[in-house]
């Protein structure tokens, strides 16, 4: 099975950097997704990591360590619009198991 | 612009009613999913379909059924709605990929209230 853990809530200041962690336990590994979900809206895809290391995409980067069962999402130069829930998800076949999400609040 | 469209944004139904939630995608995706999302419980998979007329139970299928008669449409059916089925329902689709996983595209969600 897959157990996925993320912090429930985080708060950061506009312009700062924040790191959202995700740990997982899985019997088979096929990569890890990160999604962003604004309140009342649908999740949207942010990143997919299948190999170890850091992948950068503008202000957002995602890191994966398969041996440690660990990933993080790094958000730089935080903006107010980054206030949202961030979900990590581990694929199992064509399906995915989602973490409960981390609600990030960005304050001025 | 790729789209997954759910038929209703908000729905209020009475206990015992049969409820249909419809989802249509225009990306020619083979895979379609129904999730429910509840505070503190995250996204939980109800049912999954990997092809027309094919379906597979997810983690919480009890009290639900699905129908996939056409590739673009995936319906979730609550046979007899109960108050514990009050939730946000999210439909998603994805392509099977070629030896790797592809991201899911989500609809805007249907907030169902059963009274």
Image (cartoon, rainbow, N blue to C red):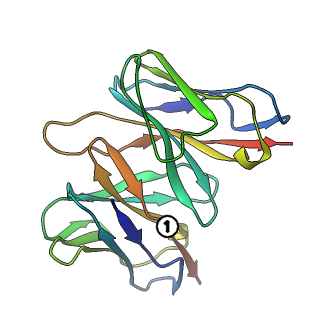
- The residue lying at 23 percent from left, 45 percent from top is B101
Q: Is residue A16 above or below residue B85?
A: below
- The residue lying at 20 percent from left, 57 percent from top is A28
Q: Mark 1: few, some, or many residues within 10 Å (few <14, many ≥20)?
A: many
- The residue lying at 20 percent from left, 58 percent from top is A29
Residue farthest to the front, as pictured:
B62
Choose between B77 and A20: the one closer to the eye: B77
- Asked if residue B1 shows in the view, the reply is no
Relative horizontal placement of residue B87, taking residue B46 as reference (left or right): right
Q: Is residue B87 above or below residue A11?
A: above
Relative horizontal placement of residue A50, taking residue B91 as reference (left or right): left
Q: Is residue B83 above or below residue B25?
A: below
Q: Quadrant of residue B70?
A: top left
- Asked if residue A55 shows in the view, the reply is yes
Q: Which quadrant: the C terminus of chain A?
A: bottom right
Residue named by callout 1: A101
Q: Position of residue A18 (x, y in %)?
A: 40, 82
């Amino acid at each position: 099975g897959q157990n996925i853990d993320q912090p429930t809530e985080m708060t950061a200041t506009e312009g700062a950097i924040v790191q959202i962690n995700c740990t997982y336990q899985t019997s088979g590994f096929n990569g890890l997704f990160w999604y962003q979900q604004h309140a009342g809206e649908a999740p949207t895809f942010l990143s997919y990591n299948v190999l170890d290391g850091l992948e950068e995409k503008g202000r957002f980067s995602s890191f994966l360590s398969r041996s440690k069962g660990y990933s993080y999402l790094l958000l730089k130069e935080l903006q107010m619009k980054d206030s949202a829930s961030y979900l990590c998800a581990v694929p199992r076949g064509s399906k995915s198991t989602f973490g409960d999400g981390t609600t990030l609040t960005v304050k001025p | 612009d790729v789209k997954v469209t759910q038929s209703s944004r908000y729905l209020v139904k009475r206990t015992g009613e049969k409820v249909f939630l419809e989802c249509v995608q225009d990306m020619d995706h083979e895979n379609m999913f129904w999730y429910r999302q509840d505070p503190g419980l995250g996204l939980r998979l109800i049912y999954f379909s990997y092809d027309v007329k094919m379906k597979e139970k997810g983690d919480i299928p009890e009290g639900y059924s699905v129908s996939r008669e056409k590739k673009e449409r995936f319906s979730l059916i609550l046979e007899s709605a109960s108050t514990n089925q009050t939730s946000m329902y999210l439909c998603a689709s994805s392509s099977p990929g070629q030896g790797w996983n592809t991201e899911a595209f989500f609809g805007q969600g249907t907030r169902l209230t059963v009274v």
